[in-house]
């Protein structure tokens, strides 16, 4: 992921902001004493993850899914895969594994939630349902130039979205969060429709750390900078997730990206170790991954 990339990450203030006041309120409303935690990478492609797969690995997904309990499925952004492909992915992965697929770009970037977007939504949903119980939250990522002037499109899209499928949305235009009136209306819309407000943590766009949950799900897209601060930033996230767990969060979905993806499995393993220690979670710890960073 190149989004938010900076040349000098050592000059960035990576402080994790305090929670938005609405986050405390929504967690009170949706309190749960049980939490599901999914931590993984954004892709399993061997070219992007050199060194992660043992020599001779023939099926990257089959191997990956034995190391992590989920994948943020970015491949589905580029085209609508046939139902048969989702069936194959389902059959290659173990029980308990989940896919968190991105909605295809026809919907978000090309049609931009216009009125004629529904056929793409219907086809996508029909095919992705073949992941069955391994289907996690589907997420919609809007283009950075898709601003609040398009609010009516968001409302119409959400009204037609099948309510039995969990949805998360990532807004990138800064005015969704910096305009108080717009953000209030947006958060209300997401809350009323049980849609997760994605939090994106990347070096060059600190404004997207709005820290505003809109339902009982924390959907976090973490982008490392291939810098030593990647680890201290993860420490801060562990601390925040411990707080949210005590406040009653039900779902934690955390996906690790990097501009150079080779380090993503290592960061994910580090994060899983920390969560197991601090939360008493029992997440599987990936094997065959070195404990020391290789790029820093």
Image (cartoon, helix red, strand yellow):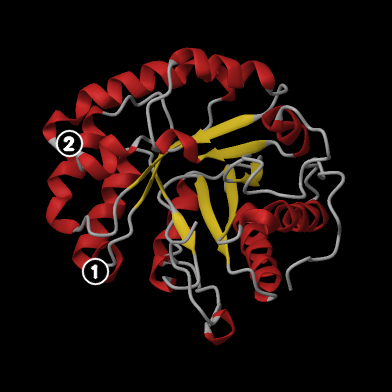
Q: Is residue 59 above or below residue 209?
A: above
Local SS, label 1:
helix
Q: How many marks?
A: 2
> Label 1: few (<14), some or many (≥20) within 10 Å?
few
- In the rendered view, would you say 115 is above or below 191? above
Q: Which quarter of the figure is the C terminus placed in?
A: bottom right
Horizontal placement of 23 versus 124: left or right? right
Residue 252 in percent (x, y) is at 59, 46
Q: Give x and y (percent) for residue 1.
A: 50, 56
Nearest the eye: 79 or 291: 79
Give the number of the disc on residue 222: none
Between the residue at mark 1 and the residue at mark 2, the CA separation in whole angstroms equals 22 Å
- Give whichever of 135, 210 is nearer the camera: 135
Quarter of the image where one finds residue 235: bottom right
Examine the rendering and report whether any part of residue 209 can be seen. Answer: yes
The answer to whether one can see residue 248 in this image is no
Residue 42 position in % (x across, y down): 57, 45
Instruction: Provide the secondary structure element on which disc 2 rests.
Output: helix
Query: Does residue 253 appear to the left or right of 211 in the view shown?
Result: right
Question: Label 1 belongs to which residue?
Answer: 180
Question: Residue, x 27% and y 35% (percent of image)?
Answer: 106
Write down the residue under mark 2: 156
Q: Which mark is nearer the camera, 1 or 2?
A: 2
Residue 58: image x %, image y %? Answer: 75, 28
**50 in relation to 156, above or below:** below
Label 2: how many Cα within 10 Å (few below 14, some 14–19, many 20+): few
- Give the mark nearest the N terminus, 1 or 2: 2
Q: Residue at x 51, y 45 (%)?
A: 217
Residue shown at 22% from the left, 55% from the top: 146
């Amino acid at each position: 992921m190149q989004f938010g990339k900076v040349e000098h990450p050592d000059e960035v203030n990576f402080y994790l902001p305090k929670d938005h006041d609405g986050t405390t309120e929504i967690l009170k409303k949706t309190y749960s004493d049980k939490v599901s935690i999914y931590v993984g990478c954004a892709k399993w492609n061997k070219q992007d993850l050199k060194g992660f797969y043992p020599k001779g690995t023939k099926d990257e997904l089959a191997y990956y899914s034995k190391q992590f309990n989920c994948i943020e499925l970015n491949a589905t952004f580029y085209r609508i895969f046939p139902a048969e492909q989702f069936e194959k992915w389902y059959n290659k992965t173990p029980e308990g594994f989940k896919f968190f697929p991105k909605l295809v770009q026809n919907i978000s970037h090309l049609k931009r939630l216009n009125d004629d977007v529904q056929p793409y939504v219907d086809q996508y949903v029909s095919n992705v349902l073949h992941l069955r119980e391994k289907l996690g939250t589907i997420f919609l990522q809007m283009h950075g130039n898709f601003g609040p002037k398009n609010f009516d499109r968001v409302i119409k899209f959400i009204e037609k979205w099948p309510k039995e499928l969990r949805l998360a949305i990532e807004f990138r235009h800064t005015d969704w969060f910096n305009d108080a009136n717009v953000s209030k209306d947006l958060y209300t819309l997401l809350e009323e429709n049980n849609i997760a407000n994605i939090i994106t943590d990347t070096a060059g766009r600190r404004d997207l750390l709005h820290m505003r949950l809109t339902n009982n799900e924390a959907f976090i897209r973490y982008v490392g900078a291939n810098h030593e601060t990647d680890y201290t930033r993860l420490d801060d996230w562990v601390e925040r997730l411990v707080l949210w767990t005590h406040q009653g969060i039900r779902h934690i979905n955390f996906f690790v990206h990097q501009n150079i993806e080779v380090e993503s499995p290592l960061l994910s393993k580090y994060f899983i170790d920390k969560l197991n220690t601090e939360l008493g979670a029992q997440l599987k710890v990936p094997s065959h991954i070195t404990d020391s960073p290789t790029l820093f």
